[in-house]
């Protein structure tokens, strides 16, 4: 998952700060940035099934974590407000 130790986080602090200043306005913008990171990751690796799989599943695991932390919370709030099905 996206939880790395403090030393690893320091390595990415400049990139993270730059991204936080951006106005990511559309889903397409977000997809462009994510895909660019995936291409960067794969650019330094042999394009074997295992590395392609790792790249794909890293993004999927991040999506799962995002869903767990944000979308599920929103769904639970709607259920509490409107009642269960």
Image: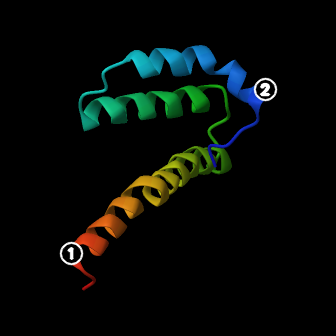
Looking at the picture, tell me which residue is in the foreground, 72 or 78: 78
Residue at the image position 65 percent from the left and 44 percent from the top: 51
The x and y percentages for residue 2 are 62, 43
Q: Label 2: how many residues lie within 10 Å, few (<14), some (14-19) or many (20+)? A: few
Q: Label 1: how many residues lie within 10 Å, few (<14), some (14-19) or many (20+)? A: few
Looking at the picture, tell me which residue is in the foreground, 53 or 72: 72
Q: In front of the other: label 2 or label 1? A: 1
Residue at the image position 44 percent from the left and 34 percent from the top: 34
The x and y percentages for residue 31 are 35, 36
Quarter placement of the C terminus: bottom left
Residue at the image position 40 percent from the left and 16 percent from the top: 21
| Direction from residue 52 to residue 72 in the image, left or right | left
| Direction from residue 72 to residue 46 in the image, left or right | right
Q: CA–CA distance between discs 2 and 1?
A: 44 Å
Q: Is residue 30 positioned above or below 23 on the image?
A: below
Quick one: SS at disc 2?
Answer: helix
* Nearest to N terminus: mark 2 or mark 1: 2
Q: Is residue 9 positioned above or below 13 on the image?
A: below
Which residue is label 1 attached to?
A: 82
The x and y percentages for residue 68 are 48, 60
The x and y percentages for residue 6 are 75, 30
Looking at the picture, tell me which residue is in the foreground, 41 or 17: 17
Residue 12 lies in what quarter of the image? top right
Residue at the image position 31 percent from the left and 26 percent from the top: 24
Which residue is label 2 attached to?
A: 7
- State the residue lying farthest toward the left: 82
């Amino acid at each position: 998952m996206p939880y790395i130790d403090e030393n690893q986080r320091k390595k990415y602090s400049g990139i993270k700060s730059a991204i936080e200043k951006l106005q990511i306005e559309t889903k397409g913008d977000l997809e462009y940035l994510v895909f660019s990171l995936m291409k960067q990751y794969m650019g330094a690796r042999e394009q074997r099934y295992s590395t392609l799989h790792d790249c794909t599943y890293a993004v999927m695991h991040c999506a799962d974590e995002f869903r767990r932390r944000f979308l599920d919370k929103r769904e639970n709030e709607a259920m509490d407000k409107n009642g269960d099905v």
